[in-house]
Image: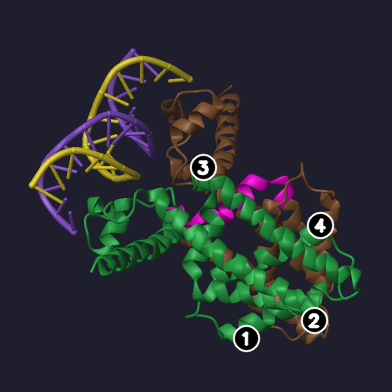
Chain colours: A green, B brown, C purple, D yellow
Amino acid sequence: MGKLKVSKNESRKDLIVKAGAALFREKGFGAASMRDLAENIGIEAASLYNHIRSKNEILESICFNVANRFNTHMDEIESGNMTPIEKIETLLRFHIRQMFDNFEEVIVSDREWKHLDEPYLSNFHTQRRNYRKRFASIIEEGIRKGEIKRIDAPTAILTMLHAVNGIESWHRSTAKITATELEDNMVIIIINGLKK
Amino acid sequence: MGKLKVSKNESRKDLIVKAGAALFREKGFGAASMRDLAENIGIEAASLYNHIRSKNEILESICFNVANRFNTHMDEIESGNMTPIEKIETLLRFHIRQMFDNFEEVIVSDREWKHLDEPYLSNFHTQRRNYRKRFASIIEEGIRKGEIKRIDAPTAILTMLHAVNGIESWHRSTAKITATELEDNMVIIIINGLKK
DNA sequence: CCTACCGATCGGTAGG
DNA sequence: CCTACCGATCGGTAGG
C-alpha cells in the first residue's frame, strides 16, 4: 500500500514534467508560468507543489531524463564493434528518432538548460561537453582509418547535432514526406558530407 | 537641428536594440527584464520608454533587421547568374558570416520570434516561409540540372540552416580553429552532402 | 488538492 | 532622463 502511494505520486510528477516540457517548449522557460501549467493539467497552481519542489525542479527532470537517454545510448555504441561510420550513422539516427519520440523534452533540454540552478547547471554542462567529446573521438577514429574526410571533428559535431534540431520546424501535418523519409534524407546529406 | 535630434534618438534606440539582443540571447525574451536592460545601459527602466514604445518593439526591431538583411541578400543571389551549387554555397557562407558578424541578433530572431505580437508575428512568419521557399527552389533547380542528389529540398533546407546555428555553441576563446577554418569545414560537409 | 495569501518583480505611465 | 508609482502577475507557503 505504501508502494502504491509512491508509484501514484511518481506518475503524477511524470505528468507534471511532461506538461511542463510542452509548456516550456511553447513559451520558453522564463515566460511559462506555474499557473499556466496548473491550468493545463486541471488543478490549482498551489497543488503543483505537492508533487514538485519548484519550477526549476521540472526543468531539472526534463534535462537529466534526456541526458541519461543519450549517455546510455552512447555507452552501447562505444562498447559495440561497428566501424566509425556505422557508429556515427547509428548515433545520428538515434538523435533523429529522439526528436520524433520525445520531441518536447529534447528541445527544452537543448534550448533551456542554461536556466538550471547550480549545482545542476555545472553538472549538465559537463555531461554535455563529455558527450560531444566522445562523439568527436569516433569521428577522429574514422579520420585515422581513412573512412572520413580530414575535417575538424568539433565542427562536424556542431554541424550534425544542430542539423538534427531542424526537425523542430518540421510539421507532420503539412509535410509531404514521412518521418522515415525525412530521417533517410537527413542521414544521406550528413553522412555523405563526412565520407571520403 | 531637428534632424540632429532625430538622428540622436535613433542611435539611442539602436543602442537599446543592440543591448536588448544581447540580453534576450542570454536570458531568453520572457526571462529578460526591462530593469536588467536599463541597468546594462546605465539608465533607469522608465527612461527606456523615451526611445522605445514597449519591450516587444525591441524584439520587432531585432527580428525585422535580420529578416531584411537575409531577404536583400537573397534578392542579389536570385538576380545573379551563378550555378545552383554556387548559389547555395554563397547563401551558406552568408548565413555563417551573419552568425559571426551579427551573432546576438541572428540568434534572437531565430529563437524568440514566436514572442512577437500580431500583426508582426504573422508578417515575420510569412517572410520566413517565403525565404525558405526561395532557397528550396534553388535546390530543386540544382536537382533538375543534375548537380544535386535527388533529395527532398525542404529537408535539405532544414538541415543546412540549422547546422549553421551550431556556430552558436562555438566559442572563439576556446576553439582551436579560426572562424575562416570553421566556415570552410562547415561548407565542405554540407555542400558535399548535397553534391551528386 | 484547495483557499487564501505573501513579498517580489514585472511592463509600463504620470509628471516633471 | 529621473522619481514615484500603478495594477498585474510571478513563484511559492501556510494551513487545512
Given the image, on which type of amino acid does mark 4 rest?
Answer: Glu
Residue marked by disc 2: B148
Front tag of 4 and 2: 4
Left or right side of B195 for A42: left
Marks 4/2 same chain: yes
Front tag of 1 and 2: 1
Instruction: Quarter of the image for the N terminus of chain A: give it.
Output: bottom left
Q: Mark 1 and mark 2: span between their CA atoms?
A: 18 Å
Q: Position of residue A131 (x, y in %)?
A: 67, 60
Q: Mark 1 and mark 4: span between their CA atoms?
A: 29 Å
Residue marked by disc 4: B183
Given residues A137 and B26, the one toward you in this image is A137
Front tag of 3 and 1: 3
Given residues B176 and B10, the one toward you in this image is B176
The subunit letter for the residue under badge 2 reads: B
> Is residue B109 part of the magenta span, yes or no?
yes
The subunit letter for the residue under badge 3 reads: A
SS at badge 1:
helix
Q: Position of residue B85 (x, y in %)?
A: 82, 73
Q: Earlier in the sequence, mark 3 or mark 1?
A: 3
SS at badge 4:
helix
Q: Position of residue B56 (x, y in %)?
A: 45, 45
- Up-down relation of residue A177 to residue B174 (above or below): below
Residues rendered magenta in the picture: B99-117
Residue marked by disc 1: A181
Given the image, on which type of amino acid does mark 2 rest?
Answer: Ile
Q: Mark 3 and mark 1: span between their CA atoms?
A: 41 Å
Given residues C6 and B142, the one toward you in this image is C6
Residue marked by disc 3: A118
Left or right side of B92 for A170: left
- For image coordinates 86% across by 64% down, the residue present is A151
